[in-house]
Image: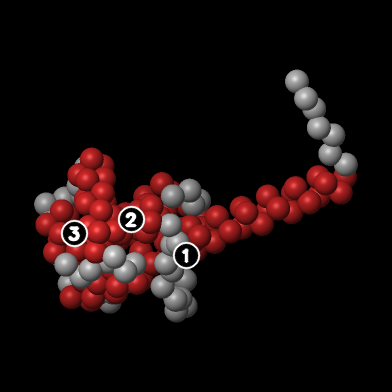
Amino acid sequence: MIFHYMSGNNRKLTNTMTSFFEHQRSSFKRNYLRNLIVLASADGSLEAEEKALITRIGLRRGLKAWQIDELLQDTTKHDVFLPESVANRMNMLFDLMELVYANRQVNENEITYIKGILVAFQLPLTVMDELTKLFEYGTPTSLQWRDFVDEICTSTAQSK
């Protein structure tokens, strides 16, 4: 076994770096959840089913209940947050679509929001039709979603 001794200064640097990355992760999660809240509010109100789903997603993504409550009560306007990695973008798209269908009442504002996300993700708008078919009868299984993501990534890569 090899042991490394860290002097006080190195420990302080390590703690600072850890704090920085924890802050970045927390900021990512909060911004991610804000997108969901904006979408859920697109029809003018945030319904109980939508709040419950946002809470479940927030907890699943590693936020604490008090952080989620804080975000749900925050009424300030925020820019749309776009994750950088394809995996995080697809996770967000899944959560957004799950939220669109949470109350089984899809409205035009929600569709417009999702289309804006597709454009920002540089995906063709035809993906909206595929997403609608995938979610209209309930949340797809993880295998169905994985197949969808693989198909989208393959077709997008081929068209470039």
Mark carried by residue 131: 3
Q: Secondary structure at mark 2?
A: helix
Q: Are marks 3 and 2 in contact (CB under 8 Å)?
A: no
Quadrant for the C terminus, please: bottom left
Q: Residue 21, image x and y in percent?
A: 62, 54
Mark carried by residue 44: none
Q: Secondary structure at mark 1?
A: helix
Query: Which residue is found at the position 42% from the left and 67% from the top?
Result: 82
Q: Residues within 10 Å of mark 3 (few under 14, many from 20)?
A: some
Observer-nearest of 75 and 21: 21
Kindly indicate the quadrant of the structure image that contains residue 80: bottom left
Q: Which is more N-terminal, label 1 or label 3?
A: 1
Q: Secondary structure at mark 3?
A: helix
Q: Of discs 3 and 1, which sits in the foreground?
A: 3
Q: Are marks 2 and 1 in contact (CB under 8 Å)?
A: no
Tell whether 84 sits left or right of 95: right
Q: Residue 157, image x and y in percent?
A: 29, 59
Q: Residues within 10 Å of mark 2 (few under 14, many from 20)?
A: some
Which residue is outermost to the bottom? 77
Q: Which residue is mark 1?
A: 31
> Amino acid type of disc 1?
Asn
Q: Of discs 2 and 1, which sits in the foreground?
A: 2
Mark carried by residue 90: 2
> How far is the residue under mark 2 from the one under mark 1?
15 Å
Query: Which residue is found at the position 25% from the left and 72% from the top?
Result: 115
